[in-house]
Image (cartoon, rainbow, N blue to C red):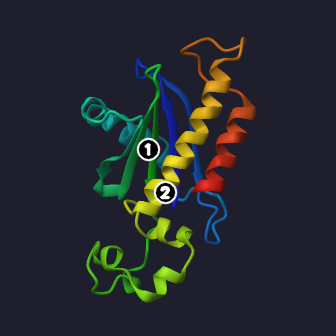
Amino acid sequence: MSYYFTILSPTDTPLFNIAFGTSKGGGDGIARFRFPETAQYMNQFIIHSSLDILEEAQWTNGGMYLKHIDTYPPAAAYISAFLTPSGARFLLLHQPPHLPSSTSTGSGLGSSSLLGSAGSTTRASSSSVAANPTSPQTEEAVRQFMNEVYENYVKTAMSPFYKQGMEIRSPVFRTRVTAAGKKWL
């Protein structure tokens, strides 16, 4: 699965961006989006197009983690969101791997994840994370990732060298976000 994570300020200014791939289930940690030549711009477009839905969802949900808030069908991309008390928004675009048509024979779009199979219950949860971006296992992994990044964001924001609304350029923060991605996603 490929991921694009961004932190937006309350004024929709990008503070931090990173693209990475899954490290679970034999992944190499490299992002492989469906449209590699335009992925950088397309990911930003998809993230920013979900901001209206995010603003509606933040008033209907009292929590900081808003789960899966939007889907972009042409790229089969899903957006999950996390709100901070300061108004910064964490958005994670996750795109499942493009599976060949021979592996998706006949069980329907979501029926295999709803019904489950005897073989998939014995597998590691990392394989079900890549198979279904809206499953409870995926939501929990994304929530854990967002919480860990939030803890690191608070530590960075409390630094005397950081001013509110500045782009985060710290290599330590980037390394910690990458490590959280490897750990949870």
> Looking at the image, can residue 36 be seen?
no
The residue located at (40%, 45%) in the rendering is 80
Structural crowding at the residue carrying mark 2, measured as other residues with C-alpha within 10 Å and reported as few (<14), some (14–19) or many (≥20): many
Which residue position holds label 2?
33
Q: Nearer the viewer, residue 161 or 96?
A: 161
The residue located at (38%, 35%) in the rendering is 63
Which residue position holds label 1?
43
Q: Is residue 178 left or right of residue 100?
A: right
The residue located at (43%, 88%) in the rendering is 118
Q: In this view, does 110 lie to the left or right of 164?
A: left
Q: In this view, does 73 lie to the left or right of 83?
A: left
Q: In which quarter of the image is residue 158?
A: top right
- In the displayed structure, 146 sits above or below 121; it is above
Tags 1 and 2 in contact by the CB under 8 Å rule? yes
Tag 1's secondary structure? helix
Whichever of labels 1 and 2 marks the residue nearer the N terminus, that label is 2
- In the displayed structure, 47 sits above or below 12; it is below
Residue 9 image position (x, y, % from top left):
47, 22
- In the displayed structure, 22 sits above or below 110; it is above
Residue 174 image position (x, y, % from top left):
68, 37
Tag 2's secondary structure? loop
Residue 44 image position (x, y, % from top left):
43, 38
> Looking at the image, can residue 13 be seen?
yes
- The quadrant the C terminus occupies is bottom right
